[in-house]
Image (cartoon, rainbow, N blue to C red):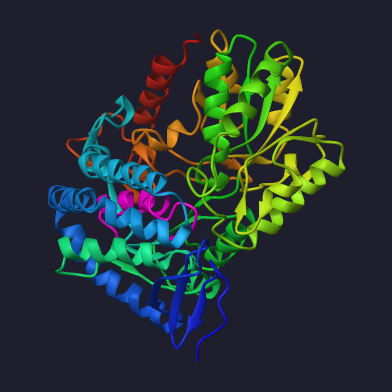
Amino acid sequence: MTATRTPGMPVVEDGFLVSTSPATGVEAGRVPISDGKGVEAAVERARTAGAWWAGLNFDGRRTRLLRWRALLAERIEELATLTHAETGKPLADAIVEATAAIEHIDWAARNAKRVLGPRRMRTRLLVAEHSGHLEYQPYGVVGVIGPWNYPILTPLGPISGALAAGNAVVLKPSEYTPAVGQWLADTFAEIVPEEPVFQVVHGLGDVGAALCRSGVGKVSFTGSTATAKKVMAACAETLTPVVLEAGGKDALIVDADADVNAAAEAAVWGSMTNAGQTCIGIERVYAVAPVYDAFVAAVVEKAGKLRLGEEIGPITMPGQVDVIRRHIDDALADGGRALLGGAGAVQPPNVAPTVLVDVPESSAAIREETFGPTVTITKVADAEEAISRANALPYGLGGAVFGKANGIRIARRLHTGMVAVNSTLSFVGMATLPFGGVGDSGFGRIHGEDGLREFGRAKSITVRRGPSLLPAMTFERTPAQVGRIVKAVKLLYGRRP
């Protein structure tokens, strides 16, 4: 029996999860749906596969990951076309997304041994008879719950780190983009056919919940703050550690000495790329008074050139259209003005670029995540006011600053995990930097060295290499030896700086 389909809405038909294009309603993917027992079986297979994968050691995994990276690069157009079909995003955007993901796989494969491999640690005088050793051991199986807005780049951040660290992976992709997730696992299996090191389980929210409770060693989640709290609660039942990248309401600060044209170009890109469906997208701008008018004019001029169906694709998740409409309507009802777009911009499944000014800070368009091609621009007296307003929300994912003299100083004061100075979104493409938020935007990191360490347990080992000069950890110590410990402590640590 075929269910009634709304373009872009996933449906379950005869045991299969079916995804459709949000633009045309044409079927984009069809994959077998999982249930709780299916998730448990996949995790059990992953435990065996993970032991084999870990046994390849860093060099063996590096070779296979780099082969997979090469396959993805060779077939990047195929992957981008599938992503376009499921999400509606322009092919060029899908190519850029895949390119960034390939870069992260390359970096994780090449650097895992250096970051996570066994190393000798320096000892201290009071325990000089012992040598210290540190290594990072894999969790075994890592569960990854991915989003629909960047179905290649976002899940491949934790997946590449987890695989490079020696874990098997079970991915639950968004029900809106299951075909992309399956494609990634299938191509990995072409390179690593021996064991099911990277598997996919498909379904709705219940499948994600089952993955959280399946006994995996760690869970990495990307999605809304509300769902992140549910994931954390489910994982808390078994004390399963989590990495959570949740919602955002990122702000851009434009200081008085900013290059206004460059700031406007970056603001339009940061707020409108992927039709604004970006967790680190610029949704708020605070421009200081001396450059405000010129900046607003430049943003309106540049955003006005964007074309629906070309640079701006449809809204992938149909229900998000209602959120975007509500935010625009509330902003206008609260006294805001639309210099571009506005109430008429919402024409499902599309939303035209919208630039709002004079929006009160209490408005939903300022305080809630919009996830659409809209941006509010607010005039402020100076950078101090901009920082205060930017930090007023509980979110703290990313942000941006344009300015010459004080750009970095302003960036350091933003309550976020990441900030771009004189650009927007650039940190997501830099494989050497950790990616993640604070506050309601989650915790933990993917990408970079910190991201690799998220997927390995630190294991400390001491090895005795001689007799104790200052025997402390024994019941056989003598009063004289305790006296020598006292003298040593005073000699080493008794001098005040």
Residue 380 is left or right of residue 200, and the answer is: right
Above or below, 484 against 453 in this view is: above
Q: Position of residue 290 (x, y in %)?
A: 71, 10
Question: Which contiguous range is marked in magenta?
Answer: 144-168
Where's residue 384, x and y in %? 71, 17
Residue 474 visible at all: no
Closer to the camera in the image, 275 or 303: 303
Q: Is residue 206 left or right of residue 86?
A: right
Residue drawn at x 61%, y 43% is: 373
Residue 200's spot in the image, x, y percent?
Answer: 35, 69
Determine if the magenta segment contains residue 111.
no
Q: Residue at x 38, y 41 (%)?
A: 447
Residue 107, x across and y down, in percent: 26, 39
- Left or right: residue 444 versus residue 381 is left
The image quarter containing residue 427 is top left
Residue 308 vertical position relative to residue 424 in the rendered view, above or below: below
Instruction: Decide if residue 377 is in sight here.
Output: yes
Residue at image position (65%, 11%) is 256
